[in-house]
Structure formats: structure tokens, C-alpha cells
Image (tube, rainbow, N blue to C red):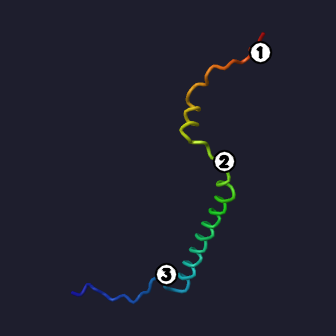
Amino acid sequence: MDTSHHSTARSWFRTRGGRRFGIEFAAIVVVKLVALTLLWFLCIRPMPRADTAPAAIERHFLPAPPSAEVAHDR
């Protein structure tokens, strides 16, 4: 009994429609990547970043020293 068979059926992606689908799909992916990159450089990258220097973090978490403020309720 011969269970191996030689299939001459071609893959759908090797047909004209499959190649067109692949090209259109790749084009959509590239266009979306370009759009996301433009959004990054135009909108997100220019935003100011928080100061993460150790001194800035220390000032943020430690209470402010008492200052000689004038009382406004007198």
C-alpha cells in the first residue's frame, strides 16, 4: 500500500491572487509602521520628560524644610 502521494496542488500564496494579497498585506503593515513612527516623532517624543536625577527624586519624596513664611491669617 502506497500512502505517499505526490500532490501537484500549488499553494494559494503562489497564485496571482495570493501574491497580490501578500503585497497588499505587506504594504498595509509598512504604512502602519510609518504612521506610528510619525506619531512618535511628532507627538510623543517632544513631550517633556520627568526629572529622574537622584537629587530630584530626593526633593520629591522628602518633606520640605520649614521655611520662614509670613502667616497670612493675622
Secondary element under disc 3, as helix, strand or loop, is: helix
Which label is found at residue 2?
Answer: none
Vertical side of 12 occupied by 32: above or below:
above
Task: Tell me the kind of residue under disc 3.
Answer: Phe
Disc 3 packing (10 Å; few <14; some 14–19; many ≥20): few
Quarter holding the C terminus is: top right
Q: Give how far apart the Cα atoms at labels 2 and 3 are.
A: 47 Å
Is 50 on the left or on the right of 70, as rendered? Answer: left
Which label is found at residue 72?
Answer: 1
Disc 1 packing (10 Å; few <14; some 14–19; many ≥20): few
Q: Position of residue 7 (x, y in %)?
A: 36, 87
Is 39 on the left or on the right of 5, as rendered? Answer: right
For label 3, the residue is: 13
Secondary element under disc 1, as helix, strand or loop, is: loop
Q: Position of residue 46 (x, y in %)?
A: 68, 53
Quarter holding the N terminus is: bottom left
Task: Tell me the kind of residue under disc 1.
Answer: His
For label 2, the residue is: 48
Q: Give how far apart the Cα atoms at labels 1 and 3 are.
A: 79 Å
Q: Position of residue 50 (x, y in %)?
A: 61, 43
Contact, CB < 8 Å: mark 1 with mark 3?
A: no
Going from N to C along the chain, the mark reached first, 1 or 3, is 3
Task: Tell me the kind of residue under disc 2.
Answer: Pro
Vertical side of 31 occupied by 67: above or below:
above
**Mark 1 vs mark 3: in front:** 1
Quarter holding residue 31:
bottom right
Spot the residue most to the left: 1
Q: Residue at x 57, y 79 (%)?
A: 23
Q: Position of residue 27 (x, y in %)?
A: 60, 74
Vertical side of 29 occupied by 47: above or below:
above
